[in-house]
Image: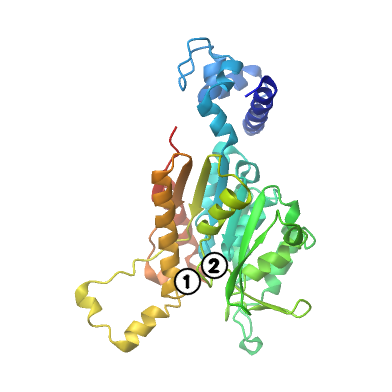
Amino acid sequence: MNEKSQEMLFIKFMKSQIEKINRERENNNRTDDEFVINWISQNSCKFRETWNNSLCSKCQKSDKCGWKSLMNCNDFQKELEMKRLAVFSGGGCKGYMPLFTLIKIENQFGPLDRYYDLMAGSSVGAINAAILSTGKMSVKTLISIYPDLIKQVFKKNGWFNGTIYNRENFIKIWDQLIGKDFKMKDCKCKLQITSVNFLNQENHFFKSWEEKDGNEKLLDVVLRSFAAPLYFGVLIDYIKKMIWFDGGMGNANLPIDRAFTEARDILKWANDIIQVDAFGCGYTDSSLSFEEGIKHKTFRQLLNYFDFNDGGLARAQARSEQVKKMEIIAKNNNNFGFTYYDIEIPKNMDKLDGIKFLEQYKEYGIKMSEKPLIEIRYRK
C-alpha cells in the first residue's frame, strides 16, 4: 500500500473516532483536552498504541508504533476495509426486540448507517433496516418511540375492509418520520428489501444501488415488504400491474443468504473481510419427543406443515438452514465473520400482532443483547 492510500485510510479512521469523541464530549458536557485524552486511552486500543508510542500489539513491529507503522499493520488495514452487513428478520411487533442489541452497537460504534455498509430486511425487518439506513433516526430515538408507533400501526380495522389492520396508519407515521418522497438511493448505506412477487411466486429483492430500484420511493418499497395477508393485505399496484406479498412469506424472512451473495458476488466484496450480523425476532421450540410425535395423526401433521405462527414449515426451516450455512462458511473462511442474535420466547408470545406483550418483548430483547447465539469472528 502506497503512502497516499495509507493516509486516506488513516484519515477515514480518524474521522470516525473524532465523531465518537465529540458525541461523548457533548453527552458529558466536557470541552477540555484531558477528556479527549482519557477517552482515547480508555476506548481505542489502536489509538492507545499510537498515543503511548509503544510497540504495536497486533504486528509486534520493532519500531515505535507511530501512525505510519500502524498503517502497515495488515490486521489494522483489514479492519478499516471490512465490509459489515446487518440483516433483520421479520416478526411484526417482535421487531422491537433486536433494537436492544442495536443500541449497544450504536453506543459503541456510532450511527449504524455509517457502521454498516449494507442493511437488509424483510417485513418489520425491512422497516427497521429502512429507517436506520436513512440516517434520519438513531436507534436510541427509535426505541423511545417504538411502543407508541406499534400501537398506532396495529390499530384494529373493521372486518368489512378485509384486513385486521389498515396500512394507512403506517403511511402517516412514515411521512412524519422519513417523508413520503425519500428515495431508496438516498439511503446513507446500501439497503436491500425483500418482497414476494405473487404473480410469479418468487422472492424479489429491491436494492438501493441499482438504478431502477434506487429511484423508487422508499415508502413504496417498504410497503411491498410489509404486506401480510389478513393483517394488512397484499399490495396491488394497478399501474405496474404487480401484486406484492409480505417479504417474510417466502423463504427469506431472514434474508442472510441473499445479502451475503449480493455483497460477495454482485458488489464485488469477495476479497474484503465480510462481517454479517443477523438479528432475529425471537423463536419458539417446536421440537417434539417421539412419544408426542406418534400422537400426531393426519390433521395435526397438516397443522404443523401449515404452521401460521411461523409461516409454514418451509419458512421455519429456511431460517435455521441459512443460519447453519453462514456458520459453516464462517468456520471455514478466514475472511468471513458471522454473528447471530436471537432468543427463545414462550409460544403464547410468538405473535405478529402481540401488542400486549411489548414489555415482555423488551425484557427478552435486553436478554438477547447480552450474548449472541453464534459468534464467529474473522481470523487473521
- How packed mark 1 is, by other alpha carbons closer than 10 Å (few <14, some 14-19, many 20 or more), is some
Disc 2 is placed on an element classified as: helix
The way the protein has been coloured in the rendering is rainbow
Given residues 284 and 257, the one toward you in this image is: 257
Q: Position of residue 283 (x, y in %)?
A: 41, 63
Q: Which residue is mark 2?
A: 92
In the rendered structure, are the residues bearing label 1 and label 2 in contact, judged by CB atoms less than 8 Å apart? yes
Residue 324, quarter of picture: bottom left
- How packed mark 2 is, by other alpha carbons closer than 10 Å (few <14, some 14-19, many 20 or more), is many
Residue at 53% over, 64% down:
90
Q: Position of residue 72 (x, y in %)?
A: 56, 21
Label 2 sits on what residue type? Gly
Label 1 sits on what residue type? Lys
Disc 1 is placed on an element classified as: loop
Residue at 58% over, 32% down:
80
Q: Is residue 280 visible?
A: yes
In this rendering, position of residue 60 left or right of residue 38: left
Given residues 297 and 161, the one toward you in this image is: 297
Q: Position of residue 19 (x, y in %)?
A: 66, 32
Residue at 65% over, 28% down:
9
- Sequence-first tag of 1 and 2: 2
Q: CA distance from mark 1 to mark 2?
A: 7 Å
Residue 224, quarter of picture: bottom right
Q: Which residue is mark 1?
A: 351
Give the quarter of the figure containing the N terminus.
Answer: top right
**Can you say whether 203 is above or below 233 in the image?**
above
